[in-house]
Image (cartoon, rainbow, N blue to C red):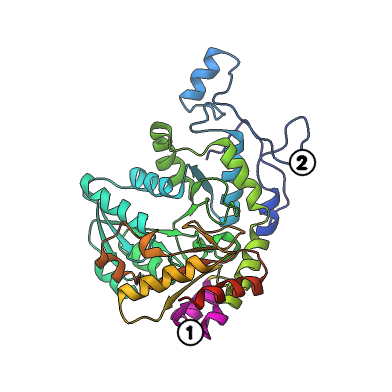
Amino acid sequence: MNEYKGIPRKRLPAGVRTDTLAVREGLPATPWGENSEALFLTSSFVHPDCATAAARFANEEDAFVYSRFSNPTVAMFERRLAAMEGTEACIATASGMAAILILVMGLLQRGDHVVCSQSVFGSTIRLFQDFAKFGVDTTFVPQEDAGAWRAAMRPNTKMLFAETPSNPLTTVSDIAALAGIAHAGGALLVVDNCFCSPALQLPVNFGADLVMHSGTKYLDGQGRVMAGAVCGPKALVEGRLVPVMRSAGMCLSPFNAWVVLKGLETLSIRMRAQSARALQVAQWLEQQPQVARVWHPSLPSHPQHALAMAQQGGQGGAVVSFALRASDADEARRRAFALIDATQICSITANLGDTKTTITHPSSTSHSRLSEAQRQAAGITQGLIRLAVGLEDVQDLIDDLQRGMEPA
């Protein structure tokens, strides 16, 4: 969160790559010389005298003061994720939704306007709608249509918000195009990088100003804790977001920070292995007569396949969505429920990013709080199923889905 003047940085050679940063970046070891990062479970920190305490609380001297806004374990996670995303700074939050909240509280005010994809996570849509009561208006546009984003711009537009690939249809935004639109209008581009993580995609390389995460997903990777983060320039993170954190306190706990910090060490290996398995499952699903359509960025049939491969390092990610054939919405919902209920290996849960494969019906779970019109606009039909592929044997996953295909 802060560049602590009194605390040295960990010494690493210049130009080390992402996989090395994922294992090594952070704070130096304590005098005890631990190899695994230390966990600092403390709410506050002791000062040598009153004058020093006053200087630290006045931000005249950088130091760890209070774990609501500065903690060594959290700082290690922030430094590591910022380095992996290629940004100057990072601020950790209690969840991905808290990361969006701190962005709006820190960067927007009454009378400002946001342009947001209509395909983002359901809770993200609801949160942006709720900001209207505080005078921040949001226009929702098709994720993949750069022209619609451009047409939605207003003189008071201050932020463009994209989630790419989107949840659950893996629709891909042209980050460079959106960055051009945002900057031409004097606005910031925020990219939710949850589905790819820095292991597959670096939005700042395509012009994004800020990158946010739900660390609950792939950064942790094993479904253990809640976490969020925003990465970006120091001027925005330290100048605009840290003051909000000090007042509002949507902070990440040291324990959760430590868990996600350790998850980052295996992020690249997990993401590539899960992406490969997801592609195999997606290819199998395309051959099933019960399936009307499959969405996965690695498939040539994906509408933004070429763009996804260019932005995501040739990897499609671990999320596969597919729609079942049905004569109407009621039949589609029954068939989707029957398929999901027949699986014996997949976990029926709306979370994703786990080493265990998860399966869910977005219309009745992650996007259930949206109106039917909003779900239809986002392509969330009653026959849609989202699969977040884990690290099980691919054939076992295919066999599990085959069990569901029969009752469906």
Taking the spot 58% from the left edge, 26% from the top edge, the residue there is 42
Q: Is residue 310 magenta?
A: yes
Task: Please identify the quarter of the rendering in which residue 120 is found.
Answer: bottom left
State whether residue 250 is above or below residue 107. above
Q: Distance between the Cα atoms at labels 2 and 1?
A: 46 Å
* Apparent side of residue 79 relative to residue 242 in the rendered image (left or right): right
**Is the residue marked by circle 2 packed among few (<14), some (14-19), or many (20+) residues within 10 Å?**
few
Q: Amino acid at mark 1?
A: Ser
Q: How far from the left and from the top, in percent, is residue 166?
A: 43, 66
Nearest the viewer among 183 and 220 is 220
- For the image, the number of numbered tags is 2
Q: Is residue 16 visible?
A: no
The magenta region covers: 282-311
Residue 101 lies left or right of residue 400; in this view the side is: left
| Numbered circle sitting on residue 301 | 1
Which one is in front in this view, the residue at disc 2 or the one at disc 1?
1
Left or right: 46 as drawn, with respect to 17: left
**Residue tagged by mark 2?**
35
